[in-house]
Image: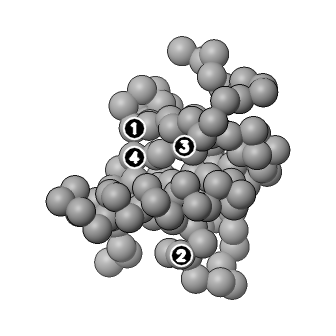
Amino acid sequence: MPESFDAFICYCPKDIEFVQEMIRRLEQTEYKLKLCVFDRDVLPGTCLWSITSELIEKRCRKMVVIISDDYLDSSECDFQTKFALSLGPGMCLHGWLVVSVGPWVREPHWARLQ
């Protein structure tokens, strides 16, 4: 049976220090969450788009999006966000946690979706 996770972390590689601190606080404390971090939990050699889709749709209960201006320029983050949005209202309304890293110069295109 494939490994399951409490949440998939969508982030830009430039925000890795923030993500690593978040992982430490959520996995190695009383919270004991199991987070899916792509660079750590996905084996090399798998198709990036298909494994990401499977993780988000079937193996992660929630989606945590780490937003920064660098996130807005990342094709991987764009795909992950759009794929999760395509799963329907249940995922969009109840399965998301958006974390802002610093002020944004631009607003994400999906931030106005309801």
Task: Please tell me whether mark 1 or mark 3 is closer to you in this view.
Answer: 3
Q: Position of residue 84 (x, y in %)?
A: 55, 42
Res. 86 visible in picture: no
Which residue type carries mark 1? Gly
- Residue 95 shows which numbered tag? 1
What is the C-alpha distance between the residues marked 1 and 3?
11 Å
Judge whether 63 appears above or below 60 on screen: above
Q: Quadrant of residue 78?
A: top right
Quadrant location of the C terminus?
Answer: top right
Q: Position of residue 44 (x, y in %)?
A: 65, 83
Which residue type carries mark 4? Lys
Q: Quadrant of residue 97?
A: top left
60, 14: nearer the viewer: 14
What is the C-alpha distance between the residues marked 1 and 2?
22 Å
Q: Earlier in the sequence, mark 4 or mark 1?
A: 4
Residues under numbered marks 3 and 2 in contact, where contact means CB atoms less than 8 Å apart: no
Residue at image mark 2: 40
**Dot 3 alpha-carbon crowd within 10 angstroms: few under 14, some 14 to 19, many 20 or more:** many
Circle 1 SS class: loop
Image point (72%, 24%), residue name = 107
- Residue 5 shows which numbered tag? none
105, 89: nearer the viewer: 105
Circle 3 SS class: strand
Q: Earlier in the sequence, mark 3 or mark 2?
A: 2
